[in-house]
Image: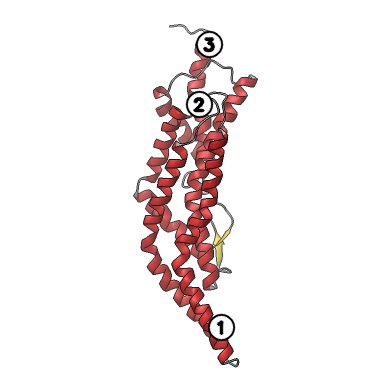
Amino acid sequence: MTFNYPEFLQLVGLYFYPFVRIGAMLSIIPLYGIRAVPVRGRVILAVFLTIVIAPALALPPPVDPFSWRGVLFILQQVLIGLAMGVVFLVVFQAFVVAGHLIAMGMGLAFASMVDPGSGVQAPVVAQYFTIVVTLLFLAMNGHLLVIQVMVDSFEYLPIGINFLNAESLRLLVEFGSYMFSAGVLVALPAITALLLINVAFGVVTRAAPALNIFAVGFPVTLITGLVMLSLTTPLILPHLQELIHRALEVITQLRLTGG
């Protein structure tokens, strides 16, 4: 069995270009792209996924990866992979925003620890939400859903030189802004309760100026925040399901300029 040069380029591209897209997505997506997962592990996972996925894909155009056209192909795969990774990242970051808002109301904004996903300092409340959301995501087979979405993306985002169109970029920006509104929605019950507590302490301070409000107020806001966290935790699953549903809608609506 012999191959001519164009067929050889197609065979190389059939495995190389999907590997680039998969690797770009795994580098930023939650669970797979956290710092606790070594780079070598992500590369090995991307190789195995490519070996499984590539035979089911259509053959790409015979383009030399070292040519300018091949560079455009590689750049397209990187941008598509990062775009899909960012969409799933927004789902997790919405709960981090909620944790920040609740921590500020409780007075625990100063109590922070290193986030294993981003490597930066984050309040312990945000870490609590991150752990719960991660466990729920795994229980819902979200890690398998990510792989399925990645495979399906090759149908409506085929390999080529076309990049995401303006409508797709608008969808990504709008979903990124939705991260903040979703975070506020998750934290709204706790924020409202803590706001009422602070207003009540403001009235007490005006009525009894000699009262040491800091010695009394901090334990009350802390206990109220913990109680509201226990009441808010069962509501995390519906919010997570809604965010995942919106994320899948955004990804399936992404289109290329020539499509």
Q: Earlier in the sequence, mark 3 or mark 2?
A: 3
Foreground pick, 181 / 107: 181
Residue density around tag 3, few if under 14, some if 14–19, many if 20 or more, within 10 Å:
few
**Which residue appears farthest toward the right when viewing the image?**
68
**Left or right side of 228 for 162:** right
Tell me, what colour scheme is on the image? secondary structure
The residue to which callout 1 is attached is: 202
Q: Residue at x 58, y 88 (%)?
A: 206
Q: CA distance from mark 3 to mark 2?
A: 25 Å
Tell me if mark 1 has few (under 14), some (14-19) or many (20+) residues whose alpha carbon lies within 10 angstroms of its own: some
Q: Secondary structure at mark 2?
A: loop
Tell me: residue 67, above or below residue 80: above
Q: Nearer the viewer, residue 240 or 128?
A: 240
Say the numbered circle drawn on residue 6.
3
Residue 132: x %, y % from top left: 41, 58
Q: Of the residues shown, which amino acid type is indicated by label 3?
A: Pro
Classify residue 32 as left or right of residue 230.
right
Front residue (pair 258, 187): 258
